[in-house]
Image (cartoon, grey):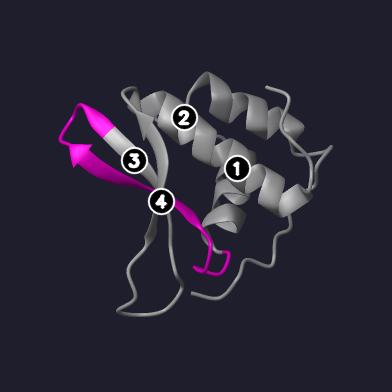
Amino acid sequence: MPASIYKIHKVNDLPYAAEFMRAPVGHQSPGLQRVLHAMRGEPLAGKYVLVVTKPHVEWQLAQLSGERGRPLARLEVFYTDLLEAERDIFRRRWLDATGERLGC
């Protein structure tokens, strides 16, 4: 998938980051959809993802290799709350996209 032409702006897109933190799943505004599309459209190498370790109970943070057939790198970070896991990945992707930590 080609990278998004939309680039995340660390100041102008902060309201959308706050929106995501309030509700990581469900209806999302067009602005938040643009931000998520940009994050999801980045190259696969190094992209953060979740691996289900215990269905509906536990997830592990991992990073994609970006190479077909090559395994992902599992990190020693585990979650028992899926919404918090989604928020953490959003924060990590925001940092990668903007170079700044998300304050919310």
Q: Residue furthest bottom?
A: 68
Residue 93 part of the magenta-drawn span: no
Q: Residue at x 44, y 25 (%)?
A: 84
Q: Earlier in the sequence, mark 1 or mark 2?
A: 2
* Precedes in sequence: disc 3 or disc 2: 2
- Magenta stretch in the rendered image: 42-58
Q: Which mark is residue 62?
A: 4
Q: Is residue 27 visible?
A: no
Amino acid at dot 4: Ala
Q: Residue at coordinates 82% horizontally, 38% vertically from top-left?
A: 12
Residue shown at 70% from the left, 53% from the top: 97
Q: Which residue is mark 3?
A: 60
Which amino acid does the dot numbered 1 rest on?
Arg
| Residue receiving disc 1 | 92
Label 2 SS? loop
Q: Residue at x 66, y 44 (%)?
A: 94
Distance of label 1 from label 3 (alpha carbons)? 14 Å
Q: Which numbered disc covers residue 20?
A: none
Identify whether 70 is placed above or below 94: below
Badge 4 or badge 1: first in the primary sequence = 4
Q: Residue furthest right?
A: 11
**Where, quadrant-wise, is the C terminus in this rendering?**
top right
Single out the mark in the foreground, 2 or 4. Answer: 4
Badge 2 amino acid: Pro
Side of 75 where 99 appears, left or right: right
